Image (spheres, rainbow, N blue to C red):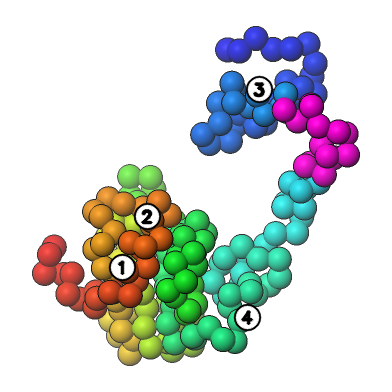
């Protein structure tokens, strides 16, 4: 355990930052010391940003992306294609795909993938909402853009089977994204090409 300074507010700030994934005690200590070198109003603005994050941020009622309003800016954008929905694992994947400038459809954020080892089943993520959305809005194509891991593939297959009775084409991004890769860490050029060169999901079943 790191030696603590005899200041409860200081130690509390370090403890809260250190609780975030990927930030240990040493990094948290350095960050808090950096903040102490700022003017008081800057520290207050820093804190207010996180209070606003808690009080004002919500999730889109359609795609479950982060939003300031009930419907996010992507879903409410009338210039985007309603006939194509790209299914992703998390919000970081939305950001990664948007950076490619190769996709002009809508998104659906599952909020995770099926993982029996972690106790995550289909009803623990936004799969029922996806099925209901597709049933109601009748898009022409669903792009599966999940991580190319065993769990990602299992989630793809589960959704594909659930959509079998609906008149919708299910595609998947091309394997330019390497096996085991997560979408958010794939470079923009590779991800963009994988989106453009997507293939029917049923073509991947022969590889199983």
Query: Does dot 3 land on a helix, a strand or a loop?
Result: helix
Q: Which residue is mark 1?
A: 194
Q: Which residue is mark 3?
A: 29
Please name which of the two marks, 2 or 3, marks the residue nearer to the observer: 2
Query: Does dot 4 land on a helix, a strand or a loop?
Result: helix
* Residue 207 higher or lower than 22, as above or below: below
The label shown at residue 186 is: 2
Q: Which residue is mark 4?
A: 76
Q: CA distance from mark 1 to mark 2?
A: 10 Å
Q: CA distance from mark 2 to mark 3?
A: 31 Å
Q: Are marks 1 and 2 in contact (CB under 8 Å)?
A: yes
Q: Position of residue 23 (x, y in %)?
A: 56, 31
Asked if residue 146 lies left or right of residue 96, the reply is: left
Q: CA distance from mark 1 to mark 4?
A: 26 Å
Q: Is residue 41 magenta?
A: yes
Packing grade of label 3 (10 A; few <14, some 14-19, many >=20) is many
Q: Is residue 56 magenta?
A: no
Q: Which residues are magenta?
A: 34-47
In primary-sequence order, the first of circles 1 and 4 is 4
Q: Position of residue 204 (x, y in %)?
A: 18, 69
Query: Can the viewer see residue 111?
Result: no
Q: Residue furthest front?
A: 189
Q: Are marks 1 and 4 in contact (CB under 8 Å)?
A: no
Observer-nearest residue: 40 or 8?
40
* Residue 95 higher or lower than 197, as above or below: above
In the rendered image, which quarter contains the C terminus?
A: bottom left
* Residue 169 higher or lower than 69, as above or below: below
Q: CA distance from mark 2 to mark 4?
A: 27 Å
In primary-sequence order, the first of circles 2 and 3 is 3
Please name which of the two marks, 3 or 1, marks the residue nearer to the observer: 1
């Amino acid at each position: 355990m790191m030696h603590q300074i005899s200041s409860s507010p200081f130690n509390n700030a370090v403890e809260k930052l250190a609780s975030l994934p990927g930030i240990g005690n040493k990094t948290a200590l350095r960050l808090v010391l950096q903040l102490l070198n700022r003017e008081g109003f800057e520290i207050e603005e820093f804190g207010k940003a996180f209070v606003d994050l808690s009080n004002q941020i919500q999730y889109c009622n359609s795609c479950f992306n982060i939003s300031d309003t009930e419907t996010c800016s992507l879903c409410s954008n009338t210039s985007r294609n309603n006939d194509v929905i790209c299914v992703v694992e998390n919000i970081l994947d939305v950001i990664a795909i948007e950076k490619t400038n190769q996709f002009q459809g809508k998104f659906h954020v599952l909020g995770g993938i099926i993982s029996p080892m972690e106790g995550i089943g289909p009803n623990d993520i936004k799969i029922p909402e996806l099925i209901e959305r597709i049933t109601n809005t009748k898009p022409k194509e669903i792009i599966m853009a999940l991580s190319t891991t065993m769990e990602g593939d299992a989630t793809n297959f589960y959704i594909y089977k659930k959509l079998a009775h609906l008149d919708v084409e299910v595609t998947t991004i091309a394997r330019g994204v390497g096996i085991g890769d997560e979408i958010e860490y794939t470079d923009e050029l590779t991800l963009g090409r994988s989106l453009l060169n997507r293939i029917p999901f049923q073509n991947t079943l022969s590889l199983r």
